[in-house]
Image (tube, rainbow, N blue to C red):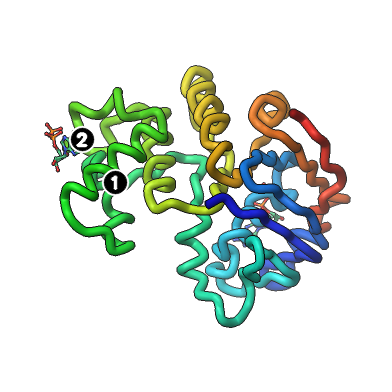
Amino acid sequence: MAKRIEVSGLHAYYGGTHAIEDISMTIEPRSVTAFIGPSGCGKSTFLRTLNRMHEVIPGARVEGKVMLDDEDLYDSSVDPVAVRRVVGMVFQRPNPFPTMSIYDNVAAGLKLNGVRGKRRLDEIVEESLRGANLWNEVKDRLGKPGAGLSGGQQQRLCIARAIAVQPQVLLMDEPCSALDPISTLAIEDLIGKLKSQYTIVIVTHNMQQAARVSDRTAFFNIAGTGKPGKLIEIDDTS
Ligand code: ADP
Ligand code: ADP
């Protein structure tokens, strides 16, 4: 299921602002690559070019190529909505649907994807919550709202929701920076486990975290105010 990502000559713009410049790199399947760099260097922008979220901002555009195995994400025949389905994303602030039950938070995307039948849904919901190391904590309260969980549990719920639809790539934008240290360790453990099944790209501003969770760390830099972010170095960290 996991796919290789091959980025070549990638630039991203917000209107006249050149946000990232000329990124080329390959990200292997079943690996974790961390992106690190100063605030404003384009890390989030880069992530959003990988699932075609960048272009939803008015005036924003992308140049260059992103291949998922042999599929060009920016080919004119490709439906951006379909891309967002196979390239899952987890955000800095856990964002479960707050009033929706824990069960429905995971099941909603499955229903949209055409999964039918309560038994089949139950099965995938359980499998996804187990996959996100959350099942034992929520199995007796699946009908309760997602907002009732702790921050760390909410983030794992968001990961369960993302993996339920069987993505090929998981993007994580500072997934721990709103969490306490214990919840952070739980997410880092989980990333280590998910690596065997997905291609994982994580943005973090924490060097220690990059070293702990990733096989490779890619460093972004900005030359100065108003200059685009550039990839300056990629190190093996495993
Ligand atoms: P990082 O994630 O590394 O903090 P971002 O990708 O958020 O950096 O931002 C990269 C650059 O793009 C910054 O100069 C930022 O101000 C600009 N930028 C980010 N989002 C927008 C937006 N919605 N509209 C215009 N400029 C933006
Ligand atoms: P509450 O948390 O309000 O007591 P329940 O946990 O009993 O509610 O059930 C809420 C939802 O979760 C229902 O849709 C139910 O079918 C589903 N559900 C409950 N237990 C399981 C289970 N073991 N496996 C899959 N789905 C379940």
Mark with earlier residue (1, 2): 1
Q: Position of residue 197 (x, y in %)?
A: 53, 42
Give left or right: position of 108 versus 184.
Answer: left
Residue 169 seen in render: yes
Residue drawn at (53%, 69%), measured in percent from left and top? 56
As helix, strand or loop, the secondary structure at mark 2 comes to loop
Q: Residues within 10 Å of mark 2 (few under 14, many from 20)?
A: some
Q: Position of residue 75 (x, y in %)?
A: 63, 77
Q: Position of residue 202 (x, y in %)?
A: 62, 41
As helix, strand or loop, the secondary structure at mark 1 comes to helix
How many tags in the picture? 2
Residue drawn at (60%, 46%), measured in percent from left and top? 199
Q: Is residue 57 above or below residue 169?
A: below
Residue drawn at (53%, 21%), measured in percent from left and top? 185
Residue type at numbered disc 2: Leu
Q: Position of residue 94 (x, y in %)?
A: 43, 39
Q: Quadrant of residue 138?
A: top left
- Label 1 to label 2: alpha-carbon separation: 10 Å
Residue 177 seen in render: no
Q: Is residue 145 above or below residue 111?
A: above
Q: Give 70 or 210, whichever is nearer the viewer.
A: 70
Label drawn at residue 142: 2
Residue drawn at (60%, 44%), measured in percent from left and top? 200
User: For mark 1, what is the residue?
Assistant: 105
Give left or right: position of 217 versus 171.
Answer: right
Label drawn at residue 210: none
Q: Is residue 15 above or below residue 5?
A: below
Disc 2 residue lies near ligand 2 with CB under 8 A: yes
